[in-house]
Image (cartoon, grey):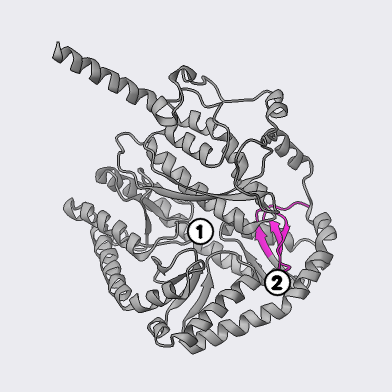
Amino acid sequence: MFCHWLIVRRLCFKKLQLQARALSGADAINALRPFYFAVHPDFFGQHPREREINENSLKRLNGYLENLQKPGFRSFKPTQLTFYVREREQSPSSVQEPFGAAGFRAVSFTLRTKDLLSTVLDILNSCSLSTDHVQSLNGSVNNQSTQETKRMFPRPIKWDKTYYSFTGFKDPEEELEQAQRMETTLSSWLDNNEKSATKKLKDSLPLRKELDRLKNELCQQLQLSDIRWQRSWGIAHRCSQLHSLSRLAHQSPEAPKNAKGQTVIFTDRSGMNATGYVMLGTMDVHHHWTKIFERLPSYSTLQKKVLFLEERISQLLGGIQITYVEELQPMLTIEEYYSILDNFYDQVHNKRLPFHPNSLRGLQMILESDRYAPSLHELGYFIIPVVCDLVTLQWFIMDKTHQAREKLKRKEESILLEKKLIKTATDKFCLQQLYKEPSVSSAQMIHSCSNLLEEPLPYLQGMHLCISHFFSVLQDGDLCIPWNWKN
């Protein structure tokens, strides 16, 4: 009788496990549609900083969801995400975070769930979005009765128009249709925004000069190689950050001496990143920055260990170069990057793959912790998961070697052509600056510059022009136009 009871308990437990994992990847995407429409970067065209944060967070979220669907994958790290959520009409009784004047609010949450259903519910609840449409909820996940969770949707969710009129939510399909109908041409947009951009640019000139002065002074005073910014912060924000660094240098002159010859980058966290740049978190106080400067000698030791591991892995994999590409990878600290290299080295060292020495010299690979299958990027980089089947990895690299070399060759040609077109367009339109957002590829930049050179655009003279994905005028007067603009 006791054995029979154990069997029943085991079967019930397995049944509950299956219920909690019953949500498929497609069902999860459908259930998250309200969330995607609330945070999608396409709706943040006038707010480049918030758009960039949402883009980066969506990449990390997609990696988390991808991991949940891996067969046999059980190792999960808590993932902290921040999104800017667009304002939606809510009932007076609902408790919401305060909205800014721009019509969106910042939401931060940490995912620790190990199944799709729990993850979907966590995301929707964290963003104060309705979960009524999510079916087959497990009672232990969302504290609701199992009577409400009898079945899953057999098809993609498509709400009736009455749903939006009753709840007050905006119909995302109508919003997208309206955006398509109101498609803007470059000429008409410049006609409407040239005066505003010119005024903002004129007003920002004193601050731009101040920024250049502060940057040059600090580079000379602290003997820095360069000062950079991770995000597209405005000129005033950047000046404020440089003033903070200048005050630190005067109050604690000994601390920054360790940064001699280094590149300092203002970002969201303090430390040293995978490329060896000194990161100063913009939300941290001087005390944290001082500690980072004091720790730089120990970071130097860790850098040497990173270079050693990269070299050893390269030797074991036929001379392929291990690289870290800021534009393609999330911002990693040097400690995180070392851990990734160390884990991968243990695998390839214990099971030596039969690559001929230097047979892969000239090729490049990126290590990713959020993937489970190797792939070849369009720019020629092998994207290799830290944990993967090494036999599969060997055959994949051997099979794609020629294709990777061709892509790398085209990448180098594209970079040269891109630089040439940027200089030609800058000279033709007498631009102060022509640049692109990190998310714009070289091919997209070439396409945009080639089309610009065919147009007479007198409004651009003396302006700062950014090739982006949206039309917008930045606070400092920079003109942002989508790379695939139409005329």
Q: Is residue 223 visible?
A: no
Give the mark nearer the N terminus: 1 vs 2: 1
Residue at 60 percent of width and 35 percent of height: 34
Q: Where residue 246 appears, x then y in whole percent?
A: 53, 83
Is label 1 in a helix, a strand or a loop? helix
Work out which quarter of the rendered image holds the N terminus and state it. top left
Q: Where residue 323 appears, x then y in whole percent?
A: 38, 62
Q: Is residue 93 above or below residue 83?
A: above
Q: Give the residue type that dot 1 points to.
A: Arg
- Please name whichever residue, 302 or 105, is drawn nearer the observer in this view of the structure: 105
What residue sits right under mark 1 in the picture? 410
Q: Is residue 183 above or below residue 359?
A: above
Residue 94 location, quadrant: top right
Query: Which-is-in-front pick, marks 1 and 2?
Result: 2
- Please name whichever residue, 131 or 28, is drawn nearer the observer in this view of the structure: 131
What residue sits right under mark 2 in the picture? 426
Residue 449 location, quadrant: bottom right
- Please name whichever residue, 190 or 317, is drawn nearer the observer in this view of the structure: 190
The label on residue 7 is none
Mark 1, Cα crowd under 10 Å, few <14 / some 14-19 / many 20+, is: some
Q: Which residues are magenta?
A: 466-487
Q: Where residue 50 appears, x then y in whole percent?
A: 60, 55
Q: Is residue 138 above or below residue 317?
A: above
Q: Residue 471 magenta-drawn?
A: yes
Is label 2 in a helix, a strand or a loop? helix
* 264 sits to left or right of 40: left
Mark 2, Cα crowd under 10 Å, few <14 / some 14-19 / many 20+, is: many
Q: Residue 99 magenta-drawn?
A: no
Q: Give the residue type that dot 2 points to.
A: Thr
Residue at 65 percent of width and 53 percent of height: 469
Residue at 69 percent of width and 49 percent of height: 103
Q: Is residue 3 visible?
A: yes
